Image (cartoon, rainbow, N blue to C red):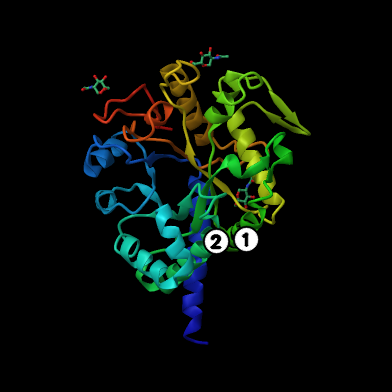
């Protein structure tokens, strides 16, 4: 009993510390560090670029040790993903999860602040979906086991696209589709019990291009002032909030009403082959407005008052992605010149 008490107080202290920092810093915006290119600058130059642009948050898709080393003592906080191909081992083998934590977190936790671990990216629905929840549990257990070697508590989550929704319009009717609902119920329960956020990739661009007749471009680009969707008492002036609130509604229906959403990816491509919705003007408008919107404290109509922590996709144009729009989501060219002016300093 006597020996248990200080540990328990320490845990409660870190828990409060985590809650506190999430609440007060939630408006800060980050970027995604995609690495699917053969002409990208070394991580040390990338970290210097981020610092010069006041970018203090990063989503790293997998534990790249060159990047982690460059990030040490940079002050940049990190969401760290696991490779999707590791999910099966993470979910079925607790010792694999332990070694993942010992290799990728323990050596860095004193010099990098990890905001969160993401067990896989956009694998629900799909063959790997069943491994996500067990992987989260095994990672959580591994983090608990390594508590003495870690400087603070690191939440465990997973990252998903909005294609998990069966219904998304109007936002209050948002619900998960039938094929993912049981997985999402387990994940929502885990996140609610641990006070961890759900990571969601929210792309108004893709919603807009698939439904241009009905969605006004200014609603997708945050540059209209009209109420476009009235949903009961709630009024929507931008598609980003509407898509995010549809996921909040879906979470409420599976016991995740208390779970906060972090937007792990959002962005707009600057070029495509058809010269349509993807343009430098539209990408510049979307990304600058996104940063201004989530840097304020307004939140979404369904969750007012808490701004949405968000990560712009992506730092660079990535030349090994599929040709077309996919290669042109970058804020910067690989030579580190900006594709269009972008302002992170709020
Ligand atoms: C919104 O921004 C786009 C891109 O710059 C521009 O083409 C459009 O005219 C703007 N719409 C409004 C309503 O200002
Ligand atoms: C903001 O989020 C915190 C923690 O998730 C919650 O307790 C609080 O009620 C929220 N504030 C508002 C104004 O919604
Ligand atoms: C950087 O790359 C872009 C795209 O290839 C090019 O337009 C620009 O001139 C380059 N800037 C410098 C300084 O080399």
Residue drawn at (62%, 36%), measured in percent from left and top? Answer: 243
Looking at the rendering, in which quadrant would you find the C terminus? top left
**Which residue, as the protein is rendered here, is positioned at the far front?**
127
- Name the foreground residue: 191 vs 132: 132
Image quadrant of residue 329?
Answer: top left
The answer to whether 158 is drawn above or below residue 273 in the figure is below
Residue drawn at (69%, 54%), measured in percent from left and top? Answer: 254
Where does the image place residue 75, in percent across and percent down from the top left? 33, 48
Where does the image place residue 52, in percent across and percent down from the top left? 28, 35
The Cα–Cα distance between marks 2 and 1, rounded to whole angstroms, is 7 Å
- Name the foreground residue: 179 vs 199: 179
The answer to whether the residues at label 2 and label 1 have Cβ atoms under 8 Å apart is yes
| Residue 304 visible in the picture | no
Mark 2 CB in 8 Å range of ligand 2? no
Residue on which the image places disc 2: 133
Residue drawn at (38%, 28%), measured in percent from left and top? Answer: 323
**Which residue, as the protein is rendered here, is positioned at the far right?**
232
Q: What label sits on residue 186 in the rendered view?
A: 1
Q: In terms of sequence position, does the residue under pointer 2 or pointer 1 come before the other?
A: 2
Where does the image place residue 173, in percent across and percent down from the top left? 74, 40
The answer to whether 234 is drawn above or below residue 228 in the figure is below
Q: Is mark 2 on a helix, strand or loop?
A: helix
Where does the image place residue 169, in percent across and percent down from the top left? 70, 34
Q: Residues within 10 Å of mark 2 (few under 14, many from 20)?
A: many
Q: Residues within 10 Å of mark 1 (few under 14, many from 20)?
A: some
Residue drawn at (27%, 25%), measured in percent from left and top? Answer: 337
């Amino acid at each position: 009993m006597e020996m248990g008490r200080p540990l328990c107080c320490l845990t409660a202290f870190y828990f409060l510390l985590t809650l506190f920092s999430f609440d007060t810093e939630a408006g800060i915006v980050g970027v995604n560090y995609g690495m699917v290119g053969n002409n990208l600058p070394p991580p040390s130059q990338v970290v210097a670029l981020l610092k010069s642009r006041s970018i203090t948050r990063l989503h790293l898709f997998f534990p790249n040790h060159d990047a982690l080393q460059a990030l040490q003592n940079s002050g940049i906080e990190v969401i760290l993903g696991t490779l999707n191909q590791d999910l099966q081992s993470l979910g079925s083998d607790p010792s694999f999860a332990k070694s993942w934590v010992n290799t990728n977190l323990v050596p860095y936790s004193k010099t990098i602040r990890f905001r969160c671990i993401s067990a896989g990216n956009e694998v629900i629905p799909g063959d790997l979906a069943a491994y996500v929840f067990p992987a989260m549990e095994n990672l959580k257990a591994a983090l608990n086991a390594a508590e003495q070697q870690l400087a603070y508590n690191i939440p465990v989550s997973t990252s998903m696209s909005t294609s998990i929704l069966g219904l998304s319009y109007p936002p209050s009717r948002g619900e998960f589709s039938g094929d993912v609902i049981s997985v999402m119920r387990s994940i929502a329960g885990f996140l609610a019990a641990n006070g961890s956020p759900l990571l969601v990739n929210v792309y108004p661009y893709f919603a807009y291009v698939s439904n241009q007749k009905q969605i006004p471009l200014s609603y997708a680009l945050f540059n209209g002032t009209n109420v476009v969707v009235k949903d009961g008492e709630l009024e929507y002036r931008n598609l980003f909030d509407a898509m995010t609130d549809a996921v909040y509604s879906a979470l409420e229906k599976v016991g995740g009403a208390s779970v906060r959403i972090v937007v792990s990816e959002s962005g707009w491509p600057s070029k495509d082959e058809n010269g349509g919705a993807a343009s430098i003007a539209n990408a510049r408008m979307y990304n600058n407005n996104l940063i201004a919107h989530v840097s304020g404290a307004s939140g979404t109509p369904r969750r007012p008052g808490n701004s949405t922590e968000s990560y712009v996709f992506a730092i660079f144009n990535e030349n090994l992605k599929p040709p077309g729009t996919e290669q042109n989501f970058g804020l910067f060219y690989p030579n580190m010149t900006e594709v269009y002016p972008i302002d992170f300093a709020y």
